[in-house]
Image (spheres, rainbow, N blue to C red):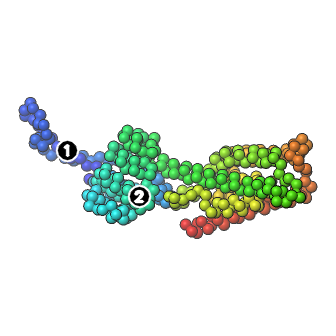
Amino acid sequence: MAERGYRVLGVASASVETNRVPDHPSRFSFSFLGLLGFEDPIRPETKGAMESCRLAGIRLVMITGDHPATAKKIAEEIGLSGKVMTGDEIEKLEDETLAIEVNNCRVYARILPSQKLRLVKAFHKNGEVVAMMGDGVNDAPALKAADIGIAMGKKGTDVAREAADLVLLDDILISVVRAISLGRRIYSNLQKAMLYILSIHIPIVGLVLIPAFWADLPTIMLPVQIVFLELIIDPVCSVAFESQPGETGQMHQPPREKRGVIFLGWFFKKSFFAGTLLLVVGNVFLISSMLSLSQPFYVSFVKNRAAQILLFSALLLVGGIFFIPGLRELFKISLLAGWLFFVVLLSAFLFLLVLEVVKRGGNKKSRTES
C-alpha cells in the first residue's frame, strides 16, 4: 500500500473486563484488525509549478515523515525520481558528509524535526539559498533557519506561521512560483528605472557643465528647462517602469548570485553609452527602449498603458513649448527650420535604432552564455 502512495495505519481492538482502565497501552491485549490506507491526492497544478521551478533554475527536494516507499511513489508522480534518503541514514552522517550527499538526493523520508534542520544547514554549507515550506509544529526550526520560511495559511499550525517569513493563503505551490516571478519582475524593473535615470542625467549634467569649461559658450540649459525634463523623468520612473510587465522568459533564467549586486559593470557602461548618444527629443525614445531589456521597444510599449499615457503627454508638452509663443519665450527656445527639425527627429530615431541593436546583441550573447 505504501508503494502505491498510501499513508498506512494499523488498526487493532482490545477489551477490558474490569471497571478499571489500564494505565498504559501495553497492558491491553490487542487483536490486529487490518490496515487503513490514506491517500493525499496531488494537486493538478503541482506538476506545472514544479516544471516552472525547474526552468527557473530552482532545485526542489521533498522532505517528509512518511514511509520511504510512500515518499518514493509520490515523488515519482511529481517528477522527483532518484534515491530516497531516510532519517536513520542522515543520523549516521557527519555534517560535512551530509553536505556532499544532499547534492545527489532529492527525496528524504522518515525525517525528524532535528534532521530537517540539519538538511537546511547542509544546503547552506553548499552556498545555496534555501526556501523551506512546511505546515506543522515540527517544521518550525527548519522554517526559521531557512533563508525564506514559507508556511501554509490554511492548514498550517500557529507555530509554523509564526516561524515563517511568508504565509500562503491558498496552500498551493503555484503561489510560490508567482511570487518568484513577481520578485524577478520588480528587480528587473528597478534595474531598468535606475538605468534610465542615469542615462538621462548624463547629457543633462554634461550640457550644464560644458559652459563651465569653455567660458565663451553661453548657458546651454536653463533651470526652467531642467525642471521641465524632471517633470517628465520622475513620473516615468515612478509609474511607467513600475507598470511594465515582466520580461519574456524571465522564469527561464537561472537565479542571480546570492551575493550579486544590482548595479554591475555593464549597467554603468550601458548608461554612459546611452547618455552620450541621447538628444533632447530622444528622451522619449530612450524611455520606450528602456521599458524592456529583452523585447523590442514597440512590443513593451504596446503592453504598458501607463507608459503610453506618459509619453503621449510628454510629446504634447514638448509640442506646446515649441508652438505656443508664451511657453516658447519662457523656455528661451525658437522654432527650428524644417530641415533642421527633420535632422533632429532622424537623429532621435537613429539613437533608438542603436539602442535596439545593442539590446538585441546583448540578448543573443546572454542566451549563448546560458
Q: Secondary structure at mark 2?
A: helix
Q: Residue at x 75, y 61 (%)?
A: 276
Report the front residue among 216 and 278: 216
Q: Residue beneath label 1, please?
A: 11
- Residue lying farthest to the right in this orientation: 337
Residue 122 lies in quadrant: bottom left
Q: Residue beneath label 2, please?
A: 124
- Residue lying farthest to the top in this orientation: 19
Residue 3 lies in quadrant: bottom left
x and y, in percent, of residue 312 in the image:
76, 46
Residue 352 sits above or below residue 25 on the image: below
Nearest to the eye among marks 1 and 2: give it. 2
Q: Is residue 79 left or right of residue 240?
A: left
x and y, in percent, of residue 133 in the image:
40, 49
Residues marked 1 and 2 touching at CB (< 8 Å)? no
x and y, in percent, of residue 207 in the image:
80, 56
Using the numbered discs, state the Cα–Cα distance from disc 1 to disc 2 in whole angstroms.
41 Å
Q: Residue at x 10, y 41 (%)?
A: 27
Q: Is residue 203 left or right of residue 365?
A: right
What type is the residue that disc 1 sits on? Answer: Val
Mark 1 packing: few (<14 Cα in 10 Å), some, or many (20+)? few
Total count of labels: 2
Report the front residue among 125 and 42: 125
What type is the residue that disc 2 sits on? Answer: His
